[in-house]
Amino acid sequence: MSTLAVEGPFRQVRVWLGEHLVIDHISETDTAASFEEAMRRRFPSLRVTNEAASAVDQ
């Protein structure tokens, strides 16, 4: 696997079941905010994080 630098205002939204990553979504800031809200509504008991995307595994 190589690491590719991401340019632009991209965010990485992740949904966690305990320590297990179950969803990993990268998109532009506005789309990521909407996705985060949707995931919080869909999975209210799971941890949802929204962080700056600095690198993407390809």
Image (cartoon, rainbow, N blue to C red):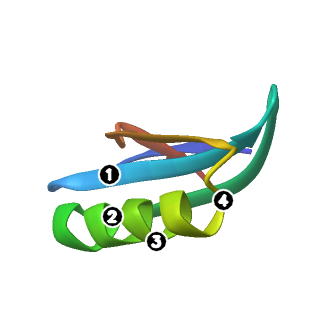
Alpha-carbon span between mark 3 and mark 1: 15 Å
Q: Give the secondary structure at mark 3.
A: helix
Which quarter of the picture shows residue 5?
top left
Q: Name the quadrant of the C terminus.
A: bottom right
* Amino acid identity at mark 1: Arg
Q: Secondary structure at mark 4?
A: loop
Residue 17: image quadrant is top right
Label 4 belongs to which residue? 43
| Mark earlier in primary sequence (4, 1) | 1
Residue 11 marker: 1
| CB within 8 Å, label 3 to label 4 | no
Query: Percent from the top left, x then y, of residue 37?
Result: 38, 64
**In this figure, which residue is indicated by the disc labeled 2?**
32
In front of the other: 3 or 49: 49
**Residue type at tag 2:** Ala
Structural distance between the alpha carbons of marks 3 and 4: 8 Å
Instruction: Give residue 40's position: percent from left, percent from top.
Output: 51, 57
